[in-house]
Amino acid sequence: MLKFLTIFTTLTVAAIIFIVPPVQGLGNLAKIIYFHIPTAWVSVIAFFCSAFFAAKFLKSQELKFDKLSAKSAKLGFIFVLLATISGAIFSKLTWGAYWNWDPRQTTIFVLILIYGAYLTLRSAVTDEKIRAKVSAVYSLLSVLTVPFLVFIIPRMYFSLHPEPILNQAGKLEMDTEILIILIAALVDTTIIFIYLLRQKAM
């Protein structure tokens, strides 16, 4: 899998560098969105995976599911940080400031706090079984906030953030060639998450 992932990632990065055209006013720096969108996407997947494995643990009481839940949450936290950092860089390029508490920036900050608290909670509880149960409940409650913080609340207020790929009119405003490359980046980042999740040491 690693060999395939390496080749696929190399081809995806090459396509972003050499095929995606520069954006007027931002040049090639705007290509950071091909990193920002996939990392944000995968963070959502990771948080839902964490909740899924948490539910599996509560049902089976098997600690392997607790470990998978914790690993998913940790990866999700890393990916959401990467999405936030890349978004801040893009914000600086387009708005002139790294951070201005735009609705999307605010909700992603809240999401970081929620899952940062999850990781803190796990490190604070020493008993393995108690930690697993408390973490599982926390994960299931936390994931309920994800759709609201990522998809719903940001659309309820005016935002400087560009329209999502699928805009409010339900139309795709992107050239087919560029959309294919973005989808490739999404798939590639998702496979990276799956690969990391399957690693024993995390």
Image (tube, helix red, strand yellow):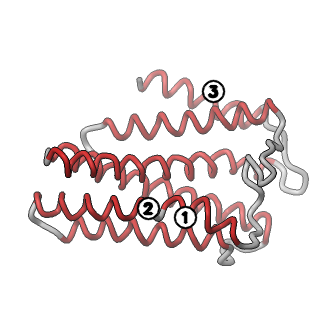
Q: Residue at x 49, y 52 (%)?
A: 43
Judged left or right of residue 133, residue 202 is right
x, y (%) of residue 79? Answer: 49, 53
Q: Position of residue 48 (x, y in %)?
A: 42, 50
Callout 1–callout 2 Cβ contact below 8 Å: yes
Q: Which mark is residue 144?
A: 2
Q: Write down the quadrant of residue 56 in the picture.
A: top left
User: Vertical placement of 166 versus 154: above or below?
Assistant: above
Q: Is residue 102 left or right of residue 108?
A: right
Q: Secondary structure at mark 2?
A: loop
Q: How many neighbours does mark 1 have within 10 angstroms: few (below 14), some (14-19), or many (20 or more)?
A: few
Could you tell whether 199 is left or right of 14 in the image? left
Q: What amino acid type is highlighted by mark number 1? A: Phe
Badge 3 is on which residue? Answer: 11
Q: How many marks?
A: 3
Q: For numbered disc 1, what is the local secondary structure?
A: helix
Q: CA distance from mark 2 to mark 3?
A: 36 Å
The dot on residue 148 is 1
Q: Which quadrant is the N terminus positioned in?
A: top left
Q: Nearer the viewer, residue 37 or 158?
A: 158
- Secondary structure beneath dot 3 equals helix
Image vertical order of residue 48 relative to residue 172, above or below: below
